[in-house]
Image (cartoon, helix red, strand yellow):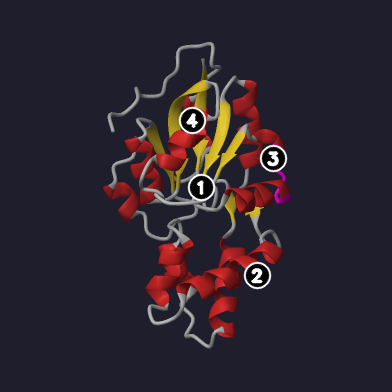
Amino acid sequence: MRPVIVFDLDGTLVDSLPDIAASFLHVFAAAGLPAPSEAELWGRLGGPLEATFAAFAPEASVDELCARYREHYALHLAERSRPFAGVPALLRELGRRGYLRAVATTKRTVTARRLIEAVGLADVLDHVEGSDAPPYKPAPDVVLRALEALPGRGLWMVGDTSADVLAGRAAGLATYAVTWGVRDVAPLDACAPTRLEPDLDALLQLCPDAGQELTAPPRSEP
């Protein structure tokens, strides 16, 4: 069976904060609510949209705010979002080496696929799994669904948040935490990922041709 690498999307493969933040700020302004800073927003991202709005506007209608956000974000999701440097080439090389490449994200599936198409990553990914209903990361469900969709064996979970690390570990994968989308490395470090790296370069060192002996560590116990 071919080895599978599961990636988070926002902050891991794609630098999407500018468009995400713009949609949040648009919603707060339209609703007449005080807006958090981008740093405050970024510290909350990675979880479900409802939880993010509830944290900043507990007295408002979360359902209404989420609907406004999704409407705005759908129109502007790739105005400034771009893959991080080297990501397309890395994914292409992993495919050449025999790895299956999946995305497991808290974004809804249709939105994740639209973003991936818009930033030019659709042809270097084998499956995209979104979170259309709870439970969300750090529960392993979205990671497990991504693995079940592919004819391979899970090897790594790659992400930029503690939720990614915990979800990957719970799914029995080795975990690779990347810090290029992170403001504070301490929460990631506290989760003790298998590897904590400033970028994705080391992933290629850990993933030789799939026909060779893999240098990645064995699967973790959930």
Q: Which mark is residue 122?
A: 3
Query: Magenta stretch containing residue 120, yes or no?
Result: yes
Spatial CA distance of label 3 from label 1 is 15 Å
Q: Nearer the viewer, residue 201 or 127?
A: 127
Q: Which residue is mark 4?
A: 147
What segment carries the magenta color? 118-122
Secondary structure under the numbered disc 1 in the rendered image: loop
Q: Main secondary structure of the magenta part?
A: loop
> Marks 4 and 3, how far apart in space?
18 Å
The answer to whether the residues at label 1 and label 4 have Cβ atoms under 8 Å apart is no
Q: Position of residue 216 (x, y in %)?
A: 41, 24
Three-letter code for the amino acid on which mark 4 is drawn? Leu
User: Is 4 left or right of 185, judged from the image as shown?
Assistant: right
User: Which is nearer the N-term, disc 3 or disc 1?
Assistant: 1
Instruction: Evaluate if marks 2 and 4 touch, with contact meaning CB atoms under 8 Å apart.
Output: no
Query: Which residue position is annotated with label 1?
Result: 105
**Residue 50 at what x, y percent from top left?**
45, 65
Classify mark 3: helix, strand or loop: helix
Task: Please tell me whether residue 24 is drawn above or below residue 79 in the rendered image.
Answer: below
Dot 2 or dot 4: first in sequence order is 2
Q: Secondary structure at mark 2?
A: helix
Give the class, few, some or many, for how many residues have Cα within 10 Å of label 2's Cα (few <14, many ≥20): some
- Residue occupying image coordinates x 57% and y 26%: 100
Report the residue marked by disc 2.
72
Residue 54, position as x, y percentages in the image: 40, 72
Distance between the Cα atoms at labels 2 and 4? Answer: 31 Å
Mark carried by residue 121: none
Above or below 2: residue 184: below
Looking at the image, tell me whether mark 2 or mark 3 is earlier in sequence order.
2
Whether the magenta-drawn stretch holds residue 78 is answered as: no
* For marks 1 and 4 on the same chain, the one whose residue lies earlier in the sequence: 1
